[in-house]
Image (cartoon, rainbow, N blue to C red):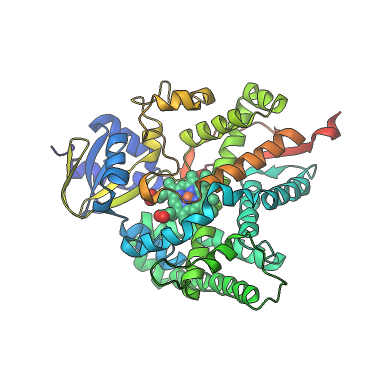
């Protein structure tokens, strides 16, 4: 059985709104046509769109070999960010994943806790008492500096850190246009935007290359043992016993940067905004910052506002998933946001209820009803890293600072870029606890 097909005139009618506000449009269509529907995107590409956890599980996990990432991820993102884990595919992806995975194991990451904590203390102290702070700029700054430190514990230099951050922000903001509005690809090229962003991407690669050379030539002193760069430099392929070549290494590092800070920064900004909206939960955490409850708060925040709000795959052969036929060549849009907001899996899905993320209650639900980090073999490699940094930052803020909204707290709508942004700025004050008493 095929999922209902949306009439072409309906798709055409929604095209502009879809580009501007995809989440409400997809939600409307899903409410009308069911948890699965088929749509011709851009007149040619056929997409099976789903907020069905069983279809997601089948595609991402059960029969993952039949599904590859689409050209959006491997082509459009890869063009600017290189071909690291996130943008790679097939056997080459598997070989890289096997090589890199050990560096992200929980025990291995424990060695980076002190480095992360150091960044968090410095960044919180820097903004504390300095007047109103833009929330997303603050969380972006912390998350970016954490990933820089995790990769280069011997330092990346202030000027290079700022430049790389600037470039990656520019690239993330730009990439969405050729993806969301493919007809703009030509004009963006003619207007020189493509070349400008490719130059920025090349500059970021050069910055990373310089630091790898410094590490290899010992010009920053003895190599640190536990950082991510050293792990990547020391890792060897099982079959050849050799390490990655420099080009590869740069690709993988650039992807870790790109995949690893905006997502976490996003989740942190939503979590802080949710806590400001729910003073009872905030007070509870400030009185006793129980890490288990904090995990539930973070997870409930990522349920409501999953930073990676959608992902996709292309079917290699015709297949059946959750009772639906997926033809060879069809793109499957896994609407993570839609799954997380579905009344099929959650009572009062729009409400912030951290207790529903208690492990016992999670076990009662479909395992793919909560997939902020994706699922199956291509699940986020940085999931433990992200949870650790979010726990550490929120734990530190809640223990040592008061965080309040500077002015009335705005109502927010999610605004989907590559990650799920807030649609307007939130300004907060971060004040050391002792300064109040
Ligand atoms: C809250 C924070 C984060 C969220 C919500 C998130 C989400 C995701 C999702 C959903 C995927 C799978 C995409 C797909 O299947 O198409 C993914 C993949 C990936 N993430 Fe994350 N991520 C986060 C943080 C991080 C961090 C901190 C790093 C690195 C330090 C990272 C590195 C990656 C990489 C390299 C991949 C590709 C993995 C592969 O295909 O083998 N992510 N992430």
In front: 166, or 290?
A: 290
Q: Is residue 73 above or below residue 123?
A: below
In the rendered image, residue 305, in percent from the top left (x then y), is placed at 48, 37
Residue displayed at 47% across by 33% down? 304
From the viewer's perspective, is 400 left or right of 91?
right
In front: 431, or 294?
A: 294
In the rendered image, residue 135, in percent from the top left (x then y), is placed at 64, 43
In the rendered image, residue 324, in percent from the top left (x then y), is placed at 18, 38
In the rendered image, residue 172, in percent from the top left (x then y), is placed at 50, 58
From the viewer's perspective, is 186 left or right of 257?
left
Residue displayed at 28% across by 35% down? 54
Q: Quadrant of the C terminus?
A: top right
* Image quadrant assignment for residue 372: top left
* Image quadrant assignment for residue 134: top right
Residue displayed at 62% across by 32% down? 291
Residue displayed at 31% across by 61% down? 90
Q: Residue furthest bottom?
A: 217
Q: Quadrant of the N terminus?
A: top left
In front: 227, or 116?
A: 227
**Can the viewer see residue 247 in this picture?**
yes
The image shows a total of numbered marks equal to: 0
From the viewer's perspective, is 199 left or right of 182?
right
In front: 315, or 430?
A: 315
Q: Is residue 287 above or below residue 231?
A: above
**Can the viewer see residue 173 in this picture?**
no
Q: Is residue 15 above or below residue 229?
A: above
């Amino acid at each position: 059985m095929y999922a209902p097909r949306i009439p072409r005139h309906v798709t055409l009618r929604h095209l502009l709104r879809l580009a501007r506000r995809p989440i409400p449009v997809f939600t409307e269509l899903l409410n009308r046509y069911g948890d699965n529907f088929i749509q011709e995107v851009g007149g040619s590409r056929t997409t099976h769109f789903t907020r069905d956890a069983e279809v997601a599980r089948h595609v991402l996990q059960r029969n993952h070999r039949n599904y590859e990432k689409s050209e959006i991820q491997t082509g459009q993102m890869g063009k600017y960010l290189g071909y690291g884990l996130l943008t790679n595919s097939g056997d080459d992806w598997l070989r890289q994943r096997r090589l890199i995975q050990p560096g992200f194991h929980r025990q291995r990451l424990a060695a980076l806790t002190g480095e992360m904590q150091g960044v968090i203390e410095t960044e919180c102290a820097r903004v504390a008492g300095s007047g109103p702070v833009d929330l997303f700029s603050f969380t972006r700054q912390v998350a970016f500096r954490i990933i820089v430190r995790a990769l280069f514990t011997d330092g990346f230099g202030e000027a290079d850190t700022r430049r790389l951050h600037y470039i990656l922000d520019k690239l993330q903001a730009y990439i969405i246009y050729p993806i969301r509005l493919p007809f703009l690809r030509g004009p963006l090229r003619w207007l020189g935007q493509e070349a400008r962003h490719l130059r920025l991407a090349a500059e970021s690669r050069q910055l990373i290359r310089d630091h790898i050379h410094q590490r290899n030539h010992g010009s920053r002193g003895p190599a640190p043992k536990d950082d991510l760069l050293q792990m990547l430099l020391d890792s060897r392929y099982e079959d050849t016993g050799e390490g990655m070549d420099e080009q590869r290494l740069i690709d993988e590092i650039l992807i870790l940067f790109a995949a690893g800070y905006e997502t976490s920064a996003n989740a942190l900004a939503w979590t802080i905004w949710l806590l400001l909206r729910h003073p009872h939960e905030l007070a509870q955490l400030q009185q006793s910052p129980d890490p288990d409850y904090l995990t539930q708060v973070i997870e409930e925040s990522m349920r409501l506002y999953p930073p990676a709000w959608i992902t996709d795959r292309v079917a290699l052969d015709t297949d059946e998933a959750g009772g639906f036929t997926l033809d060879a060549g069809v793109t499957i849009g896994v609407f993570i946001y839609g799954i997380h907001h579905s009344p099929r899996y959650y009572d009062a899905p729009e409400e912030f209820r951290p207790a529903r993320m208690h492990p016992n209650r999670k076990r009662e639900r479909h395992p793919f009803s909560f997939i902020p980090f994706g699922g199956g073999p291509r699940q986020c490699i940085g999931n433990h890293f992200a949870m650790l940094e979010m726990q550490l930052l929120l734990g530190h803020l809640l223990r040592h600072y008061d965080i309040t909204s500077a002015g009335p707290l705005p109502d927010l709508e999610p605004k989907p870029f590559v990650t799920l942004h807030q649609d307007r700025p939130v300004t907060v004050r971060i004040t050391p606890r002792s300064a109040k008493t």
